[in-house]
Image (cartoon, rainbow, N blue to C red):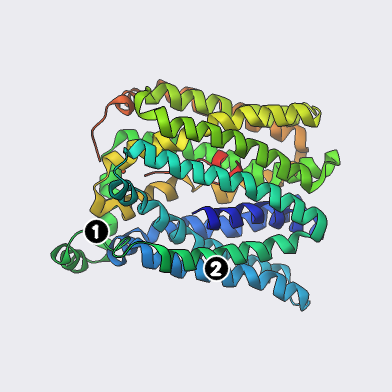
Amino acid sequence: MAVALTGTRVAAVALPWFVLVMTGSATQTGLVAFFEMAPYVVVKALTGPLVDRVGPRAVSWTTDLASAAAAAAVPLFHALHLLSFPLLLALVAVIGAARGPGDLAKEVMVPEAAERSGVPLERATGLSGVTERLASTVGPAAGGVLVALLGPLTGLVVNAGCFALGSVIIALALPRHMGEPAGGASSQAGEARAGYWKRFGEGFAFLRAEPLLLTVIIMVGITNLLDAAFMTVLMPVWAKESGSGPTAIGLTGSVMGAAAVAGSLIAAVASHRLRRRVVFFTGFLLAGAPRFLILAFDAPLGAVLAVFAVSGFGAGFLNPVIGAVLLERVPRRMLGRVNALGDSLAWAGIPLGGLIAGAAVASVGLLPVLLACGAAYFLTTNLAGLRPEWREMDRPGGRGVLKRHPEENAPRNSADATT
């Protein structure tokens, strides 16, 4: 996870900057983000039954290899003067389509790792979050330096190398029999007889019967859209208009990621002793609106970094809580399909985030869009907390993971995709 996520975070700095510099268009930058994330969401949703039947290990290493090939093709075709904008869109679509199942497969192996390690599920998801935050600290910093010194395409070469290395690690280094299909031979035979669409429908029916899960999905889906807009368009445009450049993008991401590491470490150690609901909404209050507002106020870089550090600390608590709650509620044999559907629904707005933000910035400018997004983030995370389903979050008992994206980071809410 660390290797693959580090490469993805490097590319999250390099790719938008490459498009913005080459085209000068915020709209086209958002379009590239859409073409990567739309296949990510759709394919991830549809491959849940496949992960349950084939096993997450096989899905992980094969899809990482496909992502590596597509990522390496971008700088290769550019060097050969063959990289048209439509071809770039096609290549990032392949990367997204392969990365979705690969990310899902790694997430599905977390509870098995917890069992083998003999640690509480909250701690396992917390350590998974720490891994993500460490990658999100190193990745943006490395991406910013690489883009500033060697150009954005170097970052895409590094991304391809990380995908290839991650594929090798999953294929060769995991313990024997880890990541195989859940259940015995009779269970696998029954799954095969059930058929793909029946297994897919079972996952959908399970989610529909879980009010808490659906409420979390809707709330996280809105915040993920806003986080995607922030990372793929608003941050690069701010860096360009303010003169801060790609180094500032990497620096803010790394500061946020480092603070999120601290939050995740505390969550890994202590979250199973804390009230989940309080931790959850406090984390969102810190991680969301302040990032948008500090950029809107044209504050000095030091103040921006301080706000991003506080936001990262709050974001560090979110995925361990969400992951533990949902891993508890989903049976192991259905983990792939339910997790895939939940994540995909929660990430459904991410492809639109960059697209909408690019069009909005082109129409009204950066400042009004930052203010509107900050207000929407605050209202979404606070109004959602009034619903009665949240009381179930503090009750142990259930059985699985809906993670928040991007970005990463976030973002899994994409506050994490950016951290």
Left or right: residue 404 compared with residue 341 = right
Q: Position of residue 78 (x, y in %)?
A: 75, 72
Give residue 327's quadrant in the image. top left
Residue 351 vertical position relative to residue 77 in the rendered view, above or below: above
The residue identified by callout 2 is 164
Q: Amino acid at mark 1?
A: Ala
The 10 Å Cα crowd at callout 2, few under 14, some 14 to 19, many 20 or more, is: many
The 10 Å Cα crowd at callout 1, few under 14, some 14 to 19, many 20 or more, is: many
**Which one is nearer the viewer's eye here, 90 or 291?**
291
Q: Amino acid at mark 2?
A: Ala
Q: Earlier in the sequence, mark 1 or mark 2?
A: 2
The residue identified by callout 1 is 182
**Which one is nearer the viewer's eye here, 409 or 217?**
409
Left or right: residue 225 compared with residue 392 = right
Q: Are marks 1 and 2 in contact (CB under 8 Å)?
A: no
Q: Position of residue 88 (x, y in %)?
A: 67, 67
Specify whether residue 26 is in view.
yes
Give residue 194's quadrant in the image. bottom left
| Residue at the image position 65 percent from the left and 44 percent from the top | 231
**Which one is nearer the viewer's eye here, 123 or 309?**
123
Residue 65 vertical position relative to residue 396 in the rendered view, above or below: below
Left or right: residue 176 compared with residue 166 = left
| Residue at the image position 45 percent from the left and 45 percent from the top | 128
State which quarter of the image contains the C terminus.
top right
Q: Position of residue 47 (x, y in %)?
A: 38, 62
Determine whether the residue tagged by mark 1 lies in a helix, strand or loop.
Answer: loop
Residue 31 vertical position relative to residue 307 in the rendered view, above or below: below
Residue 340 vertical position relative to residue 170 in the rendered view, above or below: above
Q: Position of residue 34 (x, y in %)?
A: 60, 55
